[in-house]
Image: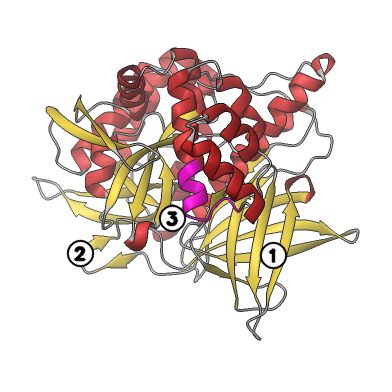
């Protein structure tokens, strides 16, 4: 699937000789990822094209005369589409030319040199382990180092990920984003400008049944056991009084296997809970707490009379969704570091035989979108396992493969300049039959 790359803003700069050039601010998952010039991206594309040939998406052409405003906007839009489309091919993500360039522009943007540094990585129980890394080490590399240090088997590393997490008061935490394999954790942490932000290790799957694949590895069991305890403590997972009593007894016995078996029957076990937000259902301005997992979006909605209502949206009835940025992008010092203000995620849902749009206003819209995409990919994997005759090829955890599926799994991204509403990303995930070339 396409990644949440966007170029919502650019600025004119002057080089040492007084010539003008345009600097593009590239955001990934709502956070400033890098600032680059067209010439840098053009050279990168030429290097990639020598390896991948015509498999690459089209790159915006050079202009030898001064660009008009409309031409500049068109180029920015085309560069954004290029970055989104080039990341669809998993072979690209493993290419050294691809990764090395993105490492370089991250370091250059934030004026960070390559050197050895200590990095604290927080475990699900909020204890941290310290690892020595290079500032230029990718999230994939850092995850390998951490996994080796705690004894996590190599073939299970793909079930876990590194995340930017904000730790708040009274033990509350907010997951801001999952770090992409090619992101530099040290740089992302330094540049996030989020108070009490840490790099955390958590499991990265939203289908609770996948726990069963990890039960033969003690390090993996330790991690999901820690996370289960913390999720119950933070009320992300919601046991009944009877379940809680049994879990407390099993925790005292340190019976991790039985604890996890019982936990899988708990409401919202393995779900990710978002910070309180607002939505337009059943009427505009309602408060909501969203929990995402097990192929559903669970909303606890607070009505105007302060009554609460639980609403569940099944992912197999979601046709598509889009993230839209509603605010301003520039301040006095230039582009903002994050696009976490005035975001909305709207999704189209089949209810009573008709399609209806639902809108969620949340700073975590990109993170919510990532979770929805994760549930779709897990659904695809399950379909592949249940229907081998369909010849569905899906990514295995820790590996990347191109997906072919007779179900719709299409990403469409666009940027609408000079509008009060800027559509950052749209994902079509309806489960209707499509042709393979549509994927």
Q: Mark 2 points at which residue?
A: 333
Can residue 157 be spotted in the picture? yes
Q: For the magenta stretch, what is the residue range?
A: 229-238
Residue drawn at (78%, 63%), measured in percent from left and top?
356
Residue drawn at (73%, 47%), measured in percent from left and top?
315
Residue 78 against residue 403 in the figure, above or below: below
Indicate the position of residue 136 as horizontal and vertical percent values: 22, 28
Cα distance between the residues tagged 3 and 2: 22 Å
Asked if the residue under mark 3 is in contact with the one under mark 1, i.e. CB atoms within 8 Å, the reply is: no
Indicate the position of residue 209 as horizontal and vertical percent values: 67, 31
> Which residue, as the protein is rendered here, is positioned at the far left?
16
Q: What SS does tag 3 mark?
A: helix
Cα distance between the residues tagged 1 and 3: 30 Å
Q: Name the residue under label 3.
A: 73
Quarter of the figure with the C terminus: top right
Which labelled disc corresponds to residue 431? Answer: none
Q: Is residue 191 left or right of residue 347?
A: left
Residue neighbourhood size for the residue with mark 1, other residues' Cα within 10 Å, grouped as few (<14), some (14–19), many (≥20): some
Q: What SS does tag 2 mark?
A: loop
Q: Name the residue under label 1.
A: 358
Q: Is residue 114 left or right of residue 374?
A: left
The mark nearer the N terminus, 1 or 3, is 3
């Amino acid at each position: 699937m396409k990644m949440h790359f966007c170029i919502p803003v650019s600025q004119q700069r002057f080089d040492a000789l007084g010539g003008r050039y345009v600097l593009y601010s590239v955001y990934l998952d709502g956070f400033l990822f890098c600032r680059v010039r067209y010439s840098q991206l053009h050279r990168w594309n030429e290097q990639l094209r020598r390896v991948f040939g015509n498999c690459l998406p089209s790159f915006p052409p050079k202009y030898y005369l001064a660009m008009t405003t409309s031409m500049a906007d068109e180029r920015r839009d085309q560069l954004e589409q290029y970055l989104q489309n080039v990341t669809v091919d998993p072979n690209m993500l493993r290419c050294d030319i691809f990764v090395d360039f993105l490492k370089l522009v991250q370091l250059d943007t934030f004026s960070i040199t390559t050197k050895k540094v200590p990095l604290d990585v927080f475990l699900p129980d909020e204890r941290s382990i310290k690892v020595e890394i290079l500032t230029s080490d990718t999230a994939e590399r850092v995850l390998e180092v951490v996994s080796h240090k705690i004894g996590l088997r190599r073939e299970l590393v793909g079930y876990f990920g590194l995340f930017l997490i904000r730790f708040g008061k009274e033990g509350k935490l907010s997951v801001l984003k999952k770090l992409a394999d090619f992101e530099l954790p040290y740089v992302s942490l330094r540049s996030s400008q989020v108070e009490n932000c840490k790099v955390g290790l958590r499991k990265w799957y939203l289908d609770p049944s996948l726990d069963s694949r990890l039960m033969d590895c003690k390090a993996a069991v330790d991690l999901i056991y820690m996370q289960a305890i913390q999720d119950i403590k933070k009320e992300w997972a919601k046991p009944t009084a009877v379940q809680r009593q049994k879990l407390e007894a099993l925790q005292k016995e340190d019976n991790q296997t039985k604890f996890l078996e019982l936990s899988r029957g708990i409401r919202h076990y393995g779900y990710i809970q978002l910070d309180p937000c607002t939505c337009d259902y059943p009427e505009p301005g309602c408060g909501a707490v969203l929990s995402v997992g097990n192929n559903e979006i669970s909303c606890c909605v607070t009505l105007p009379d302060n009554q609460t209502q639980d609403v569940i949206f099944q992912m197999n009835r979601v046709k598509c969704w889009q993230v839209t940025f509603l605010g301003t992008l520039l301040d006095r010092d230039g582009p903002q570091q994050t696009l976490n203000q005035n975001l909305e995620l709207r999704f189209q849902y089949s209810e009573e035989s008709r399609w209806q749009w639902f809108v969620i206003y949340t700073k975590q819209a990109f993170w919510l979108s990532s979770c929805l995409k994760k549930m779709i990919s897990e659904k695809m994997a399950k379909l592949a396992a249940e229907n081998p005759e369909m010849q569905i090829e899906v990514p295995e955890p820790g590996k990347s493969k191109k997906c072919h599926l007779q179900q719709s799994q299409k990403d469409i991204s666009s940027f609408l300049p000079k509008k009060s509403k800027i559509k950052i990303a749209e994902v079509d995930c309806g489960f209707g039959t499509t042709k393979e070339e549509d994927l």
